[in-house]
Image: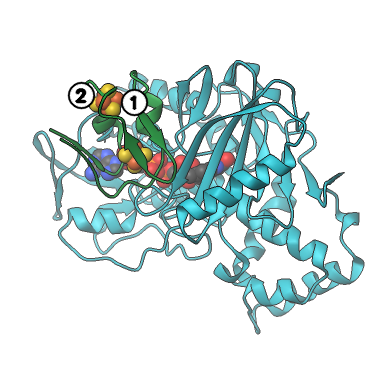
Amino acid sequence: MIEIKGCVGCSLCMLVCKFNAIRVFGEAKIDEEKCVKCMRCVDYCPVDAVNIA
Amino acid sequence: MRVAVIGSGIGGLLSANLLAESGYYVEVYEKLPFIGGRFTSINYKGYEVSTGALHMIPHGNRGPLGKLLKRLNANVEIVDSKPEGEIYYNGERVKLKKSLFPRKTLFKFYINVLLSKINDKSLLEFSKSIDEFSSKFLRSFLGWSFSIFPEDISFSKIIPIYKQILTYRGPGIPIGGCKAIINALKENIESFDGKILIKTRVKALKPGEQIRIFSNHVKDYDIVVSDIGRKLTYKLLGMEYESEVESRGIKYTIALNESFIEHTGVLFILGKNIAGMNEVTNADPNLGKRVMLQVHQPMRGDVKAEIEIGLREIREILKGYKYEIISIQSYYNDWPVNRVKTGLDIGNKTQFPNLVIVGDGAKGEDIEVDGIALGVMKALEGFI
Ligand SMILES: Cc1cc2nc3c(=O)[nH]c(=O)nc-3n(C[C@H](O)[C@H](O)[C@H](O)COP(=O)(O)OP(=O)(O)OC[C@H]3O[C@@H](n4cnc5c(N)ncnc54)[C@H](O)[C@@H]3O)c2cc1C
Ligand code: SF4
Ligand code: SF4
């Protein structure tokens, strides 16, 4: 389950995702097929917007 | 004496360095896996994409931050922008100089400086009373420098900043970008046995003779310096604080095969939503594998709609150039351009004598990180 809530679109998650799974245009969208749930984006998000379970 | 600094942004690290140098035992708490907050960069596709700032120091070497870094013996080199600024208007480019502005407008400006003490007005009112070119420049300048609009600020608030510009002049670019400054401060802090703890979030604060910090551990400190603004600090105290109004913006990082700006200064864009751009790779080629152009747009409407406008304007301005958008970054709420809009800062103190606020939620009267440097010195006045 991937949930994004309260995202401001700062793109830090996109900059650190090693699997090119994130696109940001005002807010982040994660491509679940590319995502390996490494949790890097969760750690780097400055506003705690990403939830991956 | 033990000090905790909440947040490893530039405000937090400047404070930590000053306090550690003065003999305090300092611990910096940072919730994220990296230090520097909105004033560092992440290498992405060969470009040092900044987490926030446009890799520029408003007054270069000469301003409050430049001076403070020298005082701290921080190992950084800042290159002054040459020219300081240029203006892009109706497809033409001209170097920024005083003689571009009609005498009548300059006269009005000086009169308003004199009158502002007795009859202050909003900058919007002033901007409507002058010629179109100057009015558009004012808007672009405010958008680039503070990510605000003329209606956001009163005339009197701009005067001290105008004086700082007259004294310290225009911008500079740190070699290595914002991150180089952050690394130099880290090195200093650690040389005084200060500690910087990453991935260590402060979850709550309990005020008192000593302030208790609840984090991965619970620990008491004589002084706490908070770099996260008033709203978030009060939240940690379990108190309400709603009146913080942030400035919002969008930053585009763009790769080019050949240089568009061709110098190290700011290109102010007039008459558009985007306010300006710079090309910091002209000062430090290591900041990007090709030319790195950064564009800034102040924002107050819908984010996606604003980005669409911005991209359209960029396409128009860069017509004939081959370029690639590396990243689009928007900033608001708790990750803004400034936690408090320039002109609305209310100082560094809190109701607790051993808890002070630094960073762009409590700037001094100057632009961006130069304002932060002034705020830090004010906040720590009684302690060092
Ligand atoms: C698009 C953009 C362009 C800009 N351009 C420029 C420029 O060219 N020049 C310039 O001078 N300024 C510029 N600025 C402004 C400048 O980047 C910021 O004012 C400055 O970086 C803010 O620093 P700070 O120390 O106040 O806060 P921050 O950098 O936000 O630092 C606060 C830190 O606290 C951490 N934190 C938050 N909560 C907690 C907690 N509970 N526990 C532990 N840690 C916590 C955060 O993770 C963060 O690292 C720009 C800003 C933006 C967004
Ligand atoms: S969890 Fe890892 S792989 Fe998935 S989007 Fe986040 S950073 Fe990318
Ligand atoms: S890091 Fe967080 S706020 Fe920034 S774009 Fe990603 S999800 Fe949104």
Pointer 2 local density, CA inside 10 Å: few below 14, some 14–19, many at least 20? some
In which quadrant of the rendered view does residue B262 lie?
top right
Eyeballing the image, is B185 above or below B87?
above
| Residue furthest out toward the front | A33
Q: What residue sits 59% from the left and 36% below the top?
A: B66
Q: Answer with mark 1 or mark 2, whichever residue precedes in sequence.
A: 1
Q: Is residue B321 left or right of residue B205?
A: right
The answer for how far apart the CA atoms under marks 1 and 2 are is: 10 Å
Residue at the location (89% across, 55% down)?
B100
The quadrant of the picture occupied by the N terminus of chain B is top left
The answer to whether residue B222 is left or right of residue B349 is left
Ligand 3 shows up in which quadrant of the image?
Answer: top left
Q: Three-letter amino acid code at disc 2?
A: Lys
Instruction: Judge: label 2 CB < 8 Å from ligand 2.
Output: yes
Q: Which mark is residue A21?
A: 1
For mark 1, does the 10 Å Cα neighbourhood hold few (<14), some (14 to 19), or many (20 or more) residues? some
Percent x, y of residue B120: 63, 79
Residue A37 circle label: 2
Secondary structure under the numbered disc 2 in the rendered image? loop
Residue under mark 2: which chain is it in? A
Residue type highlighted by circle 1: Ala
Q: Nearer the viewer, residue B335 or B120?
A: B335
| Chain B, chosen colour in render | cyan
In the rendered image, residue B211, in percent from the top left (x then y), is placed at: 16, 49
x 76%, y 40%: residue: B84
Q: On the rendered image, what quadrant is the C terminus of chain B found in?
A: top left
Chain for numbered disc 1: A
